[in-house]
Amino acid sequence: MAGKKGYTGKILKVNMTDGSFEDIVLDEAILRKYLGGTALGAKFLYDMAPRKTGFDDPENIVFIGAGPLNGTTVGGSGSISIVTKGALTGGATSCQANGLFGAYMRFSGYDGVIISGKSKSWKYLVLKDGKPELKDAAPIMGLDTYEVTDKLREMHDAKNRSASVLSIGPAGEQVVRWAGTFVDHGHSASHNGTGAAIGS
């Protein structure tokens, strides 16, 4: 982990429309002011998504963020926060999921990921050793979240939980408004249709 007192100081922004990546570098003052994944996500949502943006608009963002203790040995520090415009209410929403995703995201050099835009075809993001890549999601379409986790670990030769997976399952793919977001096997961030926001 880099040296900003629990943070790497970088957010990965993924533009699904054109497939581009951008590193957003954060100074320590911002990290102190917006402590944790939820506060930082709220800042990015209000800064980047126009007020009347719908949950399924390309202008909406989905922020997936780690808190300052993710990736440490502190008990109960493994949660990630997902911040977006929710599918059920249309308003700003935040929910959390446990699991290893936050730690592995941080070990790859990022405190969070911002997803924006809209892809013409289904893609999934691989983040390994600080290098992001969008890949064709056809092999995992229609699988439930447990199956997606197992399939992606198999495809990327990630044994013994050496990778973590965040997925939305068939409900998210079909943009069901109460679709949740899941980390690995059963860790759920399901309030206000975060899975629908990602799937849209």
Image (spheres, rainbow, N blue to C red):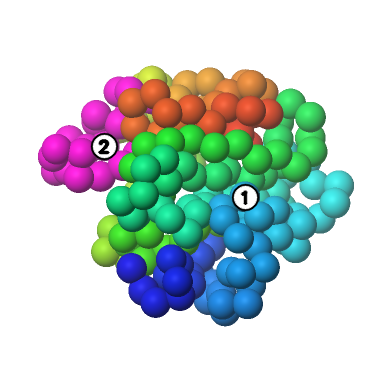
Looking at this view, is 53 or 31 the one in front? 31
Looking at this view, is 48 or 119 the one in front? 48
- The residue sitting at 62% across, 50% down in the picture is 38
> Which amino acid type is marked by label 2?
Leu
Q: Is 198 located above or below residue 1 in the figure?
A: above
Instruction: Read off the residue under disc 2.
Output: 152
Q: Is 136 located above or below residue 131 in the figure?
A: above
- The residue sitting at 70% across, 39% down in the picture is 93
Looking at this view, is 102 or 200 the one in front? 102
- The residue sitting at 56% across, 77% down in the picture is 28
The segment highlighted magenta reads 145-167
Label 2: how many residues lie within 10 Å, few (<14), some (14-19) or many (20+)? some
Residue 83 screen position, x and y as percent: 63, 45
The C terminus appears in which quarter of the rendering?
top right
**Quadrant in the picture for residue 32:** bottom right
Instruction: Read off the residue under disc 1.
Output: 38
Q: Is 174 located above or below residue 117 in the figure?
A: above
